[in-house]
Image (cartoon, rainbow, N blue to C red):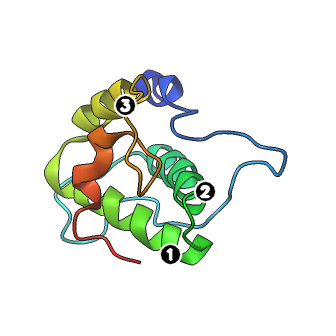
Amino acid sequence: MTRPIKMIAGLLATTSAAGIVVASFPQTSVAGQKHSYDPILVQRYNAGCVEKVVGKGKTPEQAKQMCSCSMSNMQNSMTEGEAISLLIKSQFSFDKDPNTGLPKSLSPYFQGCTA
């Protein structure tokens, strides 16, 4: 695991009495996406994202769809390094999107993502 990935290993993921949501997601970029990300980054992002979005009232399936879509949007618009930088900065944001429970800095990547 690379150092930046280790730095964000807990990104967006929070533990609870029930544990972390485990879901299966594509591990790399889909054909046609501009950038590929480390599978661990994709997995950690999606797991934490799903937990937050489910906490805002979406079903696990709806949350998986939205989070996978947002990751695809990220992969289409920025390199892995740029995404890591954004995700690290977002950890320190207190300004949360009321619809997703995630930092507002991630909101642009949810545009066009429906559940």
- Residue drawn at x 82%, y 52% as measured from the top left: 18
Q: Few, some or many C-alpha atoms within 10 Å of disc 1 (few <14, some 14-19, many ≥20)?
A: some
- Which amino acid type corresponds to the residue marked 1 in the rendered image? Gln
* Residues at marks 3 and 1, CA–CA distance in whole angstroms: 23 Å
- Residue drawn at x 42%, y 22% as measured from the top left: 92
Residue 74 appears in view: no
Q: Position of residue 8 (x, y in %)?
A: 49, 29
Please report whichever mark, 3 or 1, sits nearer to the chain's N-terminal start.
1
User: Which corner quadrant holds the C terminus?
Assistant: bottom left
> Helix, strand or loop at disc 1?
helix
Q: Which residue is mark 3?
A: 90
Q: Which residue is mark 2?
A: 55
Please report whichever mark, 2 or 1, sits nearer to the chain's N-terminal start.
2
Residue 99 appears in view: yes
Q: Quadrant of residue 13?
A: top right
* Residues at marks 2 and 3, CA–CA distance in whole angstroms: 18 Å
Left/right placement of residue 16 relative to residue 36 reads: right
Q: Which mark is residue 62?
A: 1
Left/right placement of residue 98 relative to residue 12 reads: left
